[in-house]
Image (cartoon, rainbow, N blue to C red):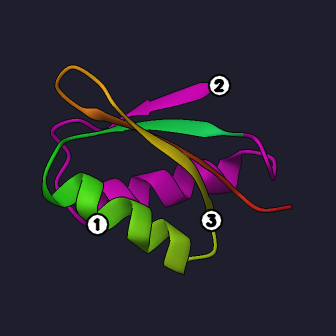
Amino acid sequence: METLDLRGTPCPLNFVRTKLRLQQLPPQQPLEVWLDAGEPIEQVPDSLRMAGYEVLGIEPRQDYFALQVQRPA
């Protein structure tokens, strides 16, 4: 699974970068995005869902969250 480390990236830049990376991947290829706690993990998954992407899961890690997302087929 490809990983995009956006820790330390403010909103909405982290959403924009995630969306751009997903557009470069083939549909249904998962992308793992590392996001900070607080606003990033609260905002980015909802924004991706509203934009039509599939959020596969959110996993808390030691000091960040790992969001798995993909472009629909």
The residue positioned farthest toward the right in the image shown: 73
Q: Quadrant of residue 8?
A: top left
Q: Which residue occupies the foreground of this view, 57 or 43?
A: 57
User: Would you say 52 lies left or right of 39 here?
Assistant: right
Q: Quadrant of residue 53?
A: bottom right
**Relative to residue 49, is residue 13 drawn left or right?**
left
Label disc, if present, on residue 70 of the rendered structure: none
Q: Which residue is painted at 20% across and 41% down in the image? A: 36
Element at badge 1? helix
Q: Residue at x 20, y 46 (%)?
A: 9
- As measured in the structure, the alpha-carbon distance from the residue carrying label 2 to the one carrying label 3 is 16 Å
Q: Amino acid at mark 2?
A: Met
Label 3 environment density (alpha carbons within 10 Å; few <14, some 14–19, many ≥20) = many
The picture places residue 71, in percent across and down from the top left corner, at 71, 58
Q: Are marks 2 and 3 in contact (CB under 8 Å)?
A: no
Residue under label 3, please give it.
53
In the rendered structure, which segment of residues is drawn in magenta? 1-29
Whether residue 26 is in magenta: the answer is: yes
Is 29 situated above or below 62?
below
User: Residue tagged by mark 1?
Assistant: 43
- Among numbered discs 1 and 2, the one appearing first in the sequence: 2
Looking at the rendered structure, the kind of residue marked 1 is Gln
Residue placed under numbered mark 2 in the picture: 1
Q: Residue at x 63, y 74 (%)?
A: 52
> Residue 40 placed where, x, y %?
23, 55
Image quadrant containing the C terminus: bottom right
